Amino acid sequence: MRIKQNHWLLLSVVTLVSFILFIRATRRAETFDIPNIEEHGRVLNKAEQAKVRHLEAMVDDLQKQLWDAQRYEKQLIDQLKNINGKPLLPLGEDVAPQLPKQLDNQDNGAKQQQDFDLNAINFNVSEMLGCQDINKIRILKTLGKGFSKIVQEGQLNGVSVAVKSAGIEVKDVQDCLKSGMYKKEEDCYVLASYKVLKEAMMLKQLRHPNIVRLTGLCLRSERSSPHIQERGMTVVVELGEPVQMQDLASLHYQERVRLCLGLAQLMFYLAESPLGSVAIEDFRDEQFVMIDKQIKLSDVDDLSSSEPECNSKMQCLLNNVNVNIKCASNMKCPGLNAKRNLANAYLVFFQPLLGFEVPPDFVEKAQDIMKRIQSGTIDAEELAQELGTLHTYMVEEWKPETPPPPMGYY
């Protein structure tokens, strides 16, 4: 029996919420630390009191949703209990279920986990590192710190990986602590951890050659630690190098067409993804990395599957221009996410890689493609087809004066 992928996303989120609530229940009676109306000797103003009441209502709503999700979880587990001949334990059990022998004996060594980790609910268990393997990762250096996470370079069995985790020192946690909304570090840490888990869940759903691959996930607690063996949550993905547009622009034109073909295929995939039409809200080259001579999306924090809203005149605008998309009954603009992605990809990648130093044989073709992207008269699927045809011709029939290197150069 096949369960839809979005069910697994729901199960994963339910797992996090259930696990966090379980930990907190063993440590204190209250689930959330809501500030009093009189906080630190100061009476909160009306706006702050409204925020508190709104948060309380959200907590009540979350609890109701959690109860509904737990009932749904039980139904799914009942349906799945005979998969591979092994019953599944309820999500959140301390001991993960035994893996089927055919997975346990594979070369990549999928192992039973002593720590709680989300591999227990993933059919592709053998492809994922669990807590025991992640414990063995040797952290080499810190690559960067974002609003909600720290990214480090690690190494496991001679293979370099990117390790992502929330930390007390990141901006979101520090802002949370300074605001006084929560008194304890672990409460603010949970908020940052949620964003890291959201990224992991997005990567579990979005599988494409031009998106970095999620290779490991471990969830233990709501603690932050500099030691990877003690971190509450750790996410492991492919490690790439920063995109250097100046270097890419100097590549042979055939190589640049190949890179843009991959990006066009990514734009088409995001337009029809398992999560719906997904927009890259913060579209910059810094959100991408180079891996195996491909440009891959590495930061999915700012992906959104919510289409933009129509304006007051029932129009769908992109950069203040009407793009002739019909406003839907829910006041959303279906298809605008895809157009935004393509327009942004044009500015960041397609124009600098395809529009300059074009071989004479392809000037007319390149200009036509650029104009159609700018005018919005070509979608991602058509663009991928055009670039695919062009690249095939360049590889199989074109005889340039200066042939490209066999594997390109970087």
Image: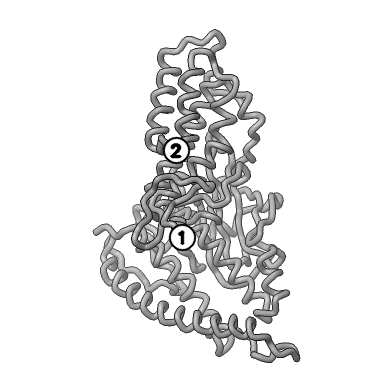
Considering every residue shown, the one lying at the far front of the view is 313
Q: Quadrant of residue 284?
A: top right
Mark 2 falls on what kind of element? Answer: loop
Nearest to the observer: residue 392 or residue 88: 392
Considering every residue shown, the one lying at the far right of the view is 41
Location of residue 347 in the rendering, given as x and y in whole percent from the top left corner:
57, 37
Nearest to the observer: residue 398 or residue 8: 398
Residue 407 in the figure: left or right of residue 377: right
Residue behind mark 2: 376
**Looking at the picture, which amino acid does disc 1 mark?**
Ser
Which numbered disc flags the more N-terminal residue, 1 or 2?
A: 1
Q: From the viewer's perspective, is residue 327 above or below residue 220?
A: above
Q: Quadrant of residue 80?
A: bottom left
Residue ID at (70%, 74%): 177
Residue behind mark 1: 312
Comparing labels 1 and 2, the label whose residue is closer to the camera: 1
Quarter of the picture containing the C terminus is top right
Residue ID at (64%, 73%): 188
Location of residue 52 in the rendering, given as x and y in whole percent from the top left corner:
59, 83
**Looking at the picture, which amino acid does disc 2 mark?**
Gly
